């Protein structure tokens, strides 16, 4: 692959410590894909609000990603950025905010994510009326879907195009919908749209069963993994910690230990970008070798940990894989 200026810079200057780990992980990612392997990317934190879609969307379009696991927040916040970007408020001095400053943001319907405030009316409520329509129509037909499938429906319908405030090629959810990329969204209830859905259930306007559950996601993932783990296998590229990574990585020991399917291969590549330092009892701070004891990774699985800010590291690795 011909290297672009970003990759050339990385190759020349990223030679030691976390920088070297970044290069090693990027080279191994590229090798895994080139040899026919598949890759899961897991998105924790607020990567969508950090606009990771500017690089992740192209990774999806170029088939460098086979499946995504993400929090409900990342699922919805990419679409919110797509339809309400011009209304977001950036606060570069967020460390200096007082409790009263924070309260004022709430009163003005701004929800803060580090240095970026999401506008409630233009983002949450704009999306709410369209997603509620999709939920209601499915329920009337006696149909049930996963959370991401409802999002795909409204994206592919074109009904949100009237609101677009960024270049749609920078939306990873739109790229994923157009590819019908497999997604699992563990703990979707812990998201704004999940909370909104629950409110409709409490008001008896929707049934909880209209939304497929986390257990159904795990059952679906087990089937997907069985069908896609032959040959080079499936790699695991984890951005941050938490449920986005914890949930899907467990599918392997579940099949091997609980179902007795001893022919199930381990994850064949593992990389975690995290600013959670190795510590006692911190799952996000556990070194990859610990995962061997849980039946998730093998002795020879390529393993990488990059202890840094994912908003810096992930776009650089994606740039390398894309040859930018």
Image (tube, rainbow, N blue to C red):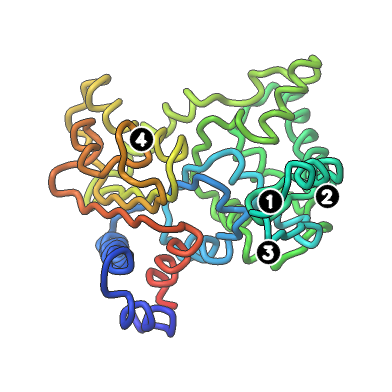
Q: Residue at x 80, y 35 (%)?
A: 133
Above or below: residue 199 compared with residue 184: above
What is the number of the mark on residue 109?
Answer: none
Task: Give the residue at mark 1.
Answer: 79
Front: mark 3 or 1: 1
Q: Residue at x 59, y 38 (%)?
A: 72
Label 1 environment density (alpha carbons within 10 Å; few <14, some 14–19, many ≥20): many
Above or below: residue 21 compared with residue 240: below
Front: mark 2 or 1: 2
Task: Give the residue at mark 3.
Answer: 168
Q: Residue at x 47, y 65 (%)?
A: 315
Asked whether disc 2 touches disc 1, contact meaning CB atoms under 8 Å apart, the reply is no
| Occupied quadrant, residue 73 | top right
Label 3 environment density (alpha carbons within 10 Å; few <14, some 14–19, many ≥20): some
Task: Give the residue at mark 4.
Answer: 282
- Looking at the rendered structure, the secondary structure element under dot 4 is loop
Q: Is residue 234 visible?
A: yes
Q: Of label 2 and label 4, which has the lower sequence position?
A: 2
Q: Of label 2 and label 1, which has the lower sequence position?
A: 1
Label 2 environment density (alpha carbons within 10 Å; few <14, some 14–19, many ≥20): some
Q: Position of residue 61 (x, y in %)?
A: 51, 63
Q: Of label 3 and label 1, which has the lower sequence position?
A: 1
Alpha carbons under labels 3 and 1: distance apart: 10 Å
**The N terminus is located in which quarter?**
bottom left
Task: Give the residue at mark 2.
Answer: 122
Q: Is residue 126 visible?
A: no
Q: Of label 3 and label 2, which has the lower sequence position?
A: 2
Q: Of label 3 and label 4, which has the lower sequence position?
A: 3
Label 4 environment density (alpha carbons within 10 Å; few <14, some 14–19, many ≥20): few
């Amino acid at each position: 692959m011909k290297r672009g200026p970003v990759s050339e810079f990385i190759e020349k200057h990223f030679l030691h410590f976390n920088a070297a780990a970044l290069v090693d992980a990027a080279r191994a990612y590229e090798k895994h894909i080139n040899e026919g392997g598949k890759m899961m990317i897991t998105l924790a934190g607020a990567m969508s609000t950090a606009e990771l879609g500017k690089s992740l969307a192209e990774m999806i379009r170029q088939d460098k990603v086979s499946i995504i696991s993400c929090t409900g927040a990342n699922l919805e916040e990419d679409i919110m950025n797509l339809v309400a970007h011009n209304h977001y408020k950036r606060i570069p001095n967020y460390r200096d905010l007082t409790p009263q400053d924070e309260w004022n943001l709430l009163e003005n319907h701004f929800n803060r994510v580090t240095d970026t405030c999401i506008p409630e009316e233009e983002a949450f409520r704009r999306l709410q009326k369209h997603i509620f329509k999709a939920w209601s129509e499915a329920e009337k037909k006696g149909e049930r879907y996963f959370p991401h499938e409802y999002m795909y429906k409204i994206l592919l319908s074109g009904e949100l195009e009237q609101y677009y405030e960024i270049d749609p090629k920078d939306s990873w959810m739109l790229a994923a919908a157009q590819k019908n990329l497999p997604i699992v969204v563990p703990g979707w209830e812990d998201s704004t749209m999940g909370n909104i859905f629950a409110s409709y259930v409490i008001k008896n306007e929707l049934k909880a069963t209209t939304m497929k559950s986390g257990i159904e996601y795990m059952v679906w993932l087990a089937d997907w993994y069985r069908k896609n783990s032959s040959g080079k296998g499936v790699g695991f590229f984890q951005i941050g910690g938490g449920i986005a990574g914890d949930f899907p990585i467990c599918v392997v020991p579940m099949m091997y230990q609980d179902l007795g399917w001893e022919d199930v291969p381990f994850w064949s590549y593992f990389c975690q970008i995290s600013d959670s330092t190795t510590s006692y009892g911190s799952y996000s701070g556990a070194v990859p070798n610990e995962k061997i004891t849980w039946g998730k990774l093998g002795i020879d699985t390529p393993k990488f940990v990059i202890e840094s800010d994912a908003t810096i590291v992930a776009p650089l690795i994606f740039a390398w894989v894309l040859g930018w």
